[in-house]
């Protein structure tokens, strides 16, 4: 947590950081929103949420997987110009990393939103989405490359087809993966004591990707419905 806390010192010192971050532009009039907290509160919120969510995330990972590395590292991406974003990746040893940009920490209006985004990103690792996307990309590249070669394409054309196929393959199931991460992220957020419905209202303030063919994310309305259905299931005693 040392890197995370060091970056958050910079956030607190900035004071007016929220005004320096390009705001997320909604595609439609959003519902009534809360006042954005000051930078000191943003930093305190993130630290509190990370401390509460990390053990819950790791417990969920151990319960749902057998051989996967569940030693999560939560970090702040304090590089300039990264916008409002969160991500999940792995280090060279396969340790899962969940990262938040300073812009997202500044944009979040409460701890529930931070917890929901954190649970969503952590869920990608538990569900094995990074390796699944890599397999999808490889399959797309192979199929389109073989078809192009069979139709008489030269080496350059085949290479271009493989690149295009990899891109198509990586996107083919990406919406399904996002909705799966929303479902599992809702469960993790709930189990950690946060309100996933309140947290998912973050969607109301980000551009709606719609339901474009081969788009990487599903429409915000579908994501909200997924969270709503999962919460209803949890309220009924499900897990």
Image (cartoon, rainbow, N blue to C red):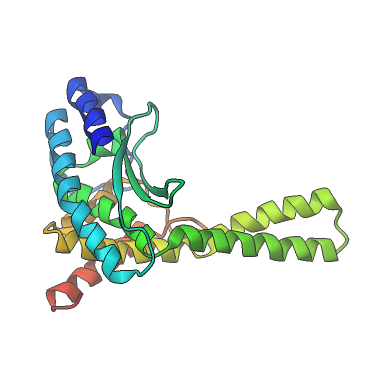
For residue 217, side relative to residue 6 (left or right): right
Q: Quadrant of the C terminus?
A: bottom left
Task: Say which residue appears at 26% left-offset and 29% top-offset.
Answer: 7
For residue 27, side relative to residue 143 (left or right): left
Q: Determine whether 64 is above or below 224 in the image.
A: below
Give the percent coordinates (x, y) of residue 123: 33, 60
Q: Determine whether 29 is above or below 8 in the image.
A: below
For residue 146, side relative to residue 225 (left or right): right
Task: Say which residue appears at 21% left-offset and 21% top-offset.
Answer: 14
- Residue situated in front as seen by the camera: 136 or 61: 61
Task: Say which residue appears at 25% left-offset and 65% top-offset.
Answer: 60
Q: Determine whether 150 is above or below 154 in the image.
A: below
Task: Say which residue appears at 29% left-offset and 39% top-offset.
Answer: 104
Q: Quadrant of the N terminus?
A: top left
Give the percent coordinates (x, y) of residue 137: 59, 59
Give the percent coordinates (x, y) of residue 98: 33, 47
Whether residue 138 is visible to the viewer of this picture, yes or no, is yes
Give the percent coordinates (x, y) of residue 143: 70, 66
- Residue situated in front as seen by the camera: 71 or 205: 71
The number of numbered badges drawn on the structure is: 0
For residue 87, side relative to residue 195 (left or right): right
Whether residue 213 is visible to the viewer of this picture, yes or no, is no
Question: Which image quadrant is residue 178 in?
Answer: bottom left
């Amino acid at each position: 947590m040392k890197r995370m806390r060091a970056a958050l010192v910079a956030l607190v010192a900035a004071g007016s950081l929220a005004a320096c971050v390009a705001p997320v532009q909604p595609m439609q009039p959003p519902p009534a929103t809360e006042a954005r907290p000051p930078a000191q509160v943003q930093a305190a919120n993130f630290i509190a949420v990370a401390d509460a969510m990390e053990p819950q995330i790791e417990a969920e990972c151990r319960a749902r997987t057998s051989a996967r590395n569940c030693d999560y590292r939560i970090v702040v991406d304090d590089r300039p110009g990264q916008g409002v974003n969160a991500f999940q990746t792995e280090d060279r040893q396969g340790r899962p990393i969940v990262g938040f940009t300073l812009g997202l920490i500044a944009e979040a209006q409460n701890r529930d939103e931070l917890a929901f985004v954190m649970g969503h990103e952590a869920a990608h690792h538990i569900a094995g989405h990074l390796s699944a996307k890599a397999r999808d990309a490889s399959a797309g590249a192979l199929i389109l490359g073989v078809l192009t070669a069979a139709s008489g394409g030269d080496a350059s054309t085949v290479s271009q087809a493989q690149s295009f196929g990899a891109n198509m393959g990586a996107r083919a199931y990406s919406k399904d993966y996002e909705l799966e991460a929303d479902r599992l992220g809702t469960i993790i957020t709930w189990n950690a004591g946060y309100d996933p419905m309140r947290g998912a209202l973050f969607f109301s303030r980000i551009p709606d990707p719609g339901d474009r063919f081969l788009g990487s994310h599903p429409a915000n309305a579908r994501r909200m419905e997924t969270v709503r259905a999962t919460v209803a299931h949890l309220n009924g005693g499900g897990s």
